[in-house]
Image (cartoon, rainbow, N blue to C red):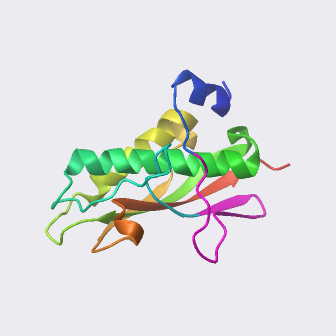
Amino acid sequence: MSFEARLAELGLELPPAPKPVGVYRPLLIQGNMAYLSGHGPLRSDGTLMVGCVGRDADLAAGQAAARQTGLALLATLRGQLGSLDRVARLVKLFGMVNCVAEFQQHPAVINGCSELLASVFGSERGVGARSAIGVVALPGGMLVEIEAIFQLHDD
């Protein structure tokens, strides 16, 4: 089954691909690697999911934001590549969680994105290396920011 078909089977709605708000590219292709800049939890209406985990958001809200960020990553991939079927595999995720200093479940939050990507690309090609950290603030107050590296099929 193609990744595009899997996305449809799962009934996932992608938000509009986010536009850069600075001097950078949302996605850069070098050879057969696709590097995605940090993405936030962009909803379909163009708003961001904001807050601080441990103060005004709980673990579940953080996971939902990470999942929504995964959808934004997929929107950028599809928009820039034309199809998710050009993806060979996820290589690496780097997730940042806007949280209080005492919060220690950063990996559990970023699982929201990891589980989404595994459901779309499969457990072998949709799971890569990963880091998850906590930070005291993110742009616009968003709950999470995630960047990703994907390997593409050779043309």
Q: What span is in magenta?
A: 16-36
The picture quadrant where one finds residue 37 is: bottom right
* In this picture, residue 30 sits left or right of residue 36: right
- In the picture provided, is 121 more to the left or to the right than 104? right
Task: Residue at 27%, 60% (x, y): give it.
Answer: 51
**Residue 9 occupies which quadrant of the picture?**
top right
Residue at the image point whose x is 24% and y is 62% from the top: 52
Total of numbered circles in the picture? 0
Asked if the stretch drawn in magenta spans residue 33, the answer is yes
The answer to whether residue 82 is above or below residue 91 is: above
x and y percentages locating residue 59 in the rendered image: 22, 50
Q: Position of residue 88 (x, y in %)?
A: 68, 45
Left or right of 9 in this view: 28: right
Residue most extreme to the right = 155
Residue drawn at the location 57% of the way across and 37% of the way down:
121
Residue 127 visible in the snapshot: no
Q: Can residue 41 be seen in this view?
A: yes
Residue at point 43%, 46% (across, down)? 68
In the image, residue 136 above or below residue 9: below
Quadrant placement of the N terminus:
top right
Q: x%, y% of residue 87?
A: 68, 45
Q: Is residue 71 part of the magenta span, yes or no?
A: no
- Magenta segment main secondary structure: loop
